[in-house]
Image: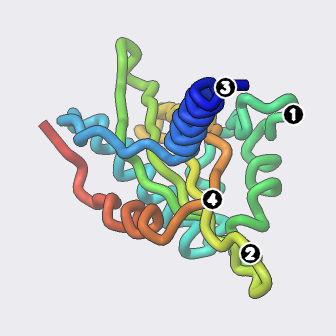
Amino acid sequence: MTVRYRNACAAVFLLLLSAAAQAAEPAVPDPLPKLSADECAVWARELSFAQSVADHDAAAFAAHLHDGAVFGAKSAQPQRGREAVAQGWAGIVAGKRMKLSWYPTMVAIGGEPGIAYSSGPALYESLAPEAKQRFSLGAFQSVWHKGADGVWRVLFDDGVQPVRATEAQVAAFREGRRQACPQG
């Protein structure tokens, strides 16, 4: 192997390593879109849903779920139905081992006015004193359905596998949360 060949291989390796590291970093969200009043209603409902977990309020959490909710929609064994989802999330809602927080950065309603999509980042915080990795960042995607009573409830939910987060990424997550919907 020549020196030139080794240097070229090392350069390619470093480029691939750099690209892999960038791919593992959660993407910086695009500027917020201008949303309709109905999309802002879903935005507010998503924030309320996240607040139910922050408040450790199992009843409020369950009230955000559609009767036929499917969580872990991409998994081989998703949780199906309000009761199963509420039971499956009881430990997260209790917040004894892990704190989960999230907020929307996008909400969209298409040609069906009673169905909405929301997505955004999610922060996982291990509460175990011996945790080697305290913070991880992921993302969520939810599909909401507006019931005959006019209330939006989560019908489908899934997420992106969280990855280790740096202090700067945690700070960016916290700074990125907006209460006000970017209404157009």
Name the amino acid type tagged 4: Arg
Looking at this rendering, what residue extends furthest in the right direction? 77
Real-space CA distance between mark 1 and mark 4, rounded to the nearest whole angstrom: 25 Å
Real-space CA distance between mark 1 and mark 3, rounded to the nearest whole angstrom: 52 Å
Real-space CA distance between mark 2 and mark 4, rounded to the nearest whole angstrom: 10 Å
What residue is drawn where x is 55% and y is 71%? 54
> Is 78 rendered above or below residue 56?
above
Determine which residue is flagged by label 4: 164
Q: Is residue 76 left or right of residue 109?
A: right
Nearest to viewer (mark 1 / mark 3): 3
> For numbered disc 4, what is the local secondary structure?
strand
Circles 1 and 2: CB atoms closer than 8 Å: no
What residue is drawn where x is 23% and y is 41%? 31
Q: Of the two numbered discs 1 and 4 on the same chain, state the one appearing first in sequence.
A: 1
Q: Of the two numbered discs 3 and 2 on the same chain, state the one appearing first in sequence.
A: 3
Q: What label sits on residue 132 in the rendered view?
A: 2
Determine which residue is flagged by label 3: 2
Determine which residue is flagged by label 1: 77
